[in-house]
Image (cartoon, rainbow, N blue to C red):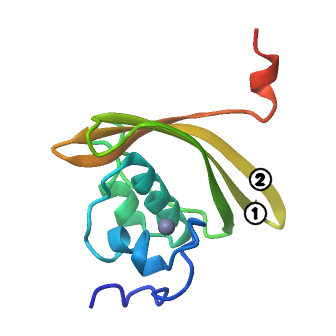
Amino acid sequence: MAGKKTGLNETPCPCGSGVEYMRCCGRYLDGGEIPKTAEQLMRSRYCGFVLCAEAYLLSTWHPDTRPGRVSLDRSQRWLGLSIRATEAGESGDDTGTVEFIARFKVDGKGHRLHEISRFEKIEDRWYYLDGQHIKTGQSNRMK
Ligand SMILES: [Zn+2]
């Protein structure tokens, strides 16, 4: 059986879906399955940050925007993910966006990352293209 690596098999998935890790994002990070929707990829990449799975983050990054390496800050503790909206990104689409808020702590201080991520499909695989950060409250004040 796949998925012995993380020891998370029967714990709830860090992405907050309420489903066991190995039946949710663990299928992609540890099980070798390929996400069918942009949201599934988004959730699994969030888990990649939680679990410091740098290789997984790189392999799901669009070749046009992929950094040479990912160095994660291990003092950063991820607290939760909430998906706010999705646009396209279904199995029949080639592009999609996912708006989310991820909460994390650094040195005991809480932060929120609010981002609209763009995803693109190449040869039937979804990749993370780029993201636009949204400042809290900003959208209401825009002219
Ligand atoms: Zn998950």
The disc label shown at residue 111, or none: 2
Image quarter where the C terminus lies is: top right
The residue drawn where x is 67% and y is 63% is 80
Q: Position of residue 53 (x, y in %)?
A: 43, 69
What residue type is disc 2 on?
His
Image quarter where the N terminus lies is: bottom left
With respect to residue 33, does 41 lie above or below? above
The residue drawn where x is 35% and y is 85% is 3
Q: Position of residue 126 (x, y in %)?
A: 30, 47
Q: Secondary structure at mark 1?
A: strand
How busy is the neighbourhood of tag 2: few (under 14 within 10 Å), some, or many (20 plus)? some
How busy is the neighbourhood of tag 1: few (under 14 within 10 Å), some, or many (20 plus)? some
Out of 101 and 64, give the one closest to the viewer: 101
Dot 2 or dot 1, earlier in sequence: 1
What residue type is disc 1 on?
Lys
User: Any atom of ligand 1 within 8 Å of the CB at mark 2?
Assistant: no
